[in-house]
Amino acid sequence: MVAAVRVHKHGGPEVLTFEDVDVPAPGPGQIRTRQHACGINYIDTYFRSGLYPSPVGMPFVAGNEGAGEVIAVGQGVADLKVGDRVAYVAPLGGYAAERVLPADRAVKLPANISYEQAAGMMLKGMTAEYLVRRTFKVQKGMTVLVHAAAGGVGLLLCQWINHLGATVIGTVGSKDKAELARANGAHHTILYRSEDFVAKVKEITGGKLCEVVYDGVGNDTFPASLDCIQPMGMFVSYGSASGPIKAFDINLLQFKGSLYATRPTLNTYNAKREALVESANALFDVVGKGAVKIPVNQKYPLKDARKAHEDLEGRATTGASILVP
């Protein structure tokens, strides 16, 4: 039996229960890991609340990101062995001291990346990777708007976009978060609670607007985000922190300047093993060089997962948060 955090019914942070669970031996194509750190992500709250259905039914162990060492391998696993340091984004089961997961979802960690860094960056970091390198290829000289620029993905986007030579405009909820976003590469910040972000984007860009908007907020920033985009630019909705964007009239994209809009997910972009490894290696490269730093700003004992979710949903966190078994 190992310690884990389970969800027996959908609801708020109070439905997260700390208990002992059985972890089976790894089956064919699986590995078992002893976790050194578990990542916390906003998507965890969607599964907990029922916004996203659990692919494994109820009850389930929350979380789908972590880092640790391989302690057993199943039949047919060739590229990982006992003792390997690994990190992953995988199906539910992450908030646990040990877990079993598909071997093809785990990647080996370079020596210069710590377990805590890895647990704080795999989902958010590979999300930033596909957003700036594949969904829309950010290039030098562009201007990019990042909503929730002091959030987990937001801070990584600011750094990576800055590294690529583009100008970053970030929206944030407080002066403290504005400082944090600027320290992580944002050239301009907008306090969205007290400032009209569309007007500020027009002012900052001299009316030229942005080639792309990255939006992890959702309902609160749509459709105003479309007014920040140059003709034939792209609106990228990758999260729903304020609630999902409801169905919208697609003709809006025509009237706002023949815009593109997409709702990508990491699962689709990294569905193939080769894409996953390439994405992880691109992330390890920029982190290893120091171009993108991983701020793990909140650490909680595994038993305090409820408090971690309360802080996350209360917008009381910055950067990455992790659980430590």
Image (spheres, grey):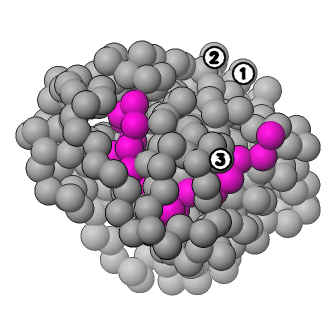
Element type at mark 3: loop
Say which mark, if any, is on residue 179. Answer: 1
Q: Judge depth for marks 3 and 1 and give the one in front.
A: 3
Real-space Cα separation, disc 3 to disc 1, in angstroms:
38 Å
Task: Look at the image and tell me whether residue 207 can be seen.
Answer: no
> Would you say residue 274 sits in the magenta stretch?
no
In which quarter of the view is residue 223 placed?
Answer: bottom left
Report x, y in % for residue 14: 17, 23
Say which mark, if any, is on residue 176. Answer: 2
- Left or right: where 159 falls relative to 48: right
Where 323 sits versus 65, above or below? above
Q: Nearer the viewer, residue 63 or 156?
A: 63
Q: Residue at x 79, y 27 (%)?
A: 183
- Left or right: where 44 falls relative to 90: left
Q: Residue at x 22, y 39 (%)?
A: 22
Q: Do residues under tags 2 and 1 come within 8 Å of each other at their CB atoms?
A: yes
Q: Residues within 10 Å of mark 3 (few under 14, many from 20)?
A: some
Real-space Cα separation, disc 2 to disc 1, in angstroms:
5 Å
Q: Do residues under tags 3 and 1 come within 8 Å of each other at their CB atoms?
A: no
Q: Residue at x 71, y 32 (%)?
A: 114
Q: Which residues are magenta?
A: 93-111
Report x, y in % for residue 304: 34, 17
Mark 3 residue type: Asp
Mark 2 residue type: Asp
Q: Nearer the viewer, residue 67 or 293?
A: 67
First in sequence: mark 3 vs mark 2: 3
Q: To which residue does mark 3 refer? A: 84
